[in-house]
Amino acid sequence: MQVAILMIHVVIAIALVVLILLQQGKGAEAGAAFGGGASQTVFGSKGSGSFLAKFTAFLAAAFFATSLALAWFATQASQAPEAGIPDSRLIEQQQGIPSLDDGGDGGDNAAPVLEESSG
């Protein structure tokens, strides 16, 4: 689910960049009034600008929503137990083998001891 939202997030980001670059600034309309196209004057029709502006606002809201969803997924993943190699004491406790850090009584060591020979 997180990967799907991330892919949608990237597509929306690219679409936002393209839509913002396609739109004309307010200064371009003022320049057209003094010798440019007759369809767009300073106070004339807006043409396709309103559609692009509304679609850009919709994409911005969707980008914000996917950002919040990805942030929520990131906080949920940080609360999950850590994956990886567990501590050696945890492994020894699960197997029932006493660890060296347990600090046992030390009297029942079954390892053979080499005695020094005089000679």
Image: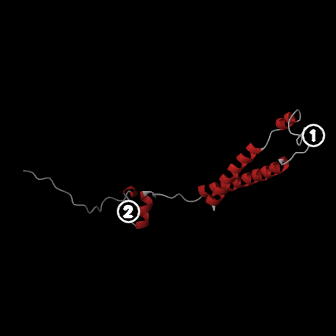
Query: Which amino acid does the dot numbered 1 rest on?
Result: Phe
Label total for image: 2
Q: Nearer the viewer, mark 2 or mark 1?
A: 1
The quadrant holding residue 23 is top right
**Residue 15 position (above or below residue 35):** below
Of 65 and 8, nearer the camera is 8
Left or right? Give the position of 95 relative to 63.
left
Residue at the spot 32% in from the left edge and 58% down from the top edge: 106
- The Cα–Cα distance between marks 2 and 1, rounded to whole angstroms, is 86 Å
Query: Which amino acid does the dot numbered 2 rest on?
Result: Pro
Q: Position of residue 2 (x, y in %)?
A: 63, 59
Neighbourhood count class around disc 2 (C-alpha, 10 Å): few under 14, some 14–19, many 20 upward: few
The residue indicated by pointer 1 is: 43
Q: Position of residue 115 (x, y in %)?
A: 16, 55
Q: Position of residue 11 (x, y in %)?
A: 67, 53
Neighbourhood count class around disc 1 (C-alpha, 10 Å): few under 14, some 14–19, many 20 upward: few
Specify the label residue 98 is tagged with: 2
Q: Position of residue 37 (x, y in %)?
A: 86, 39
Q: Earlier in the sequence, mark 2 or mark 1?
A: 1
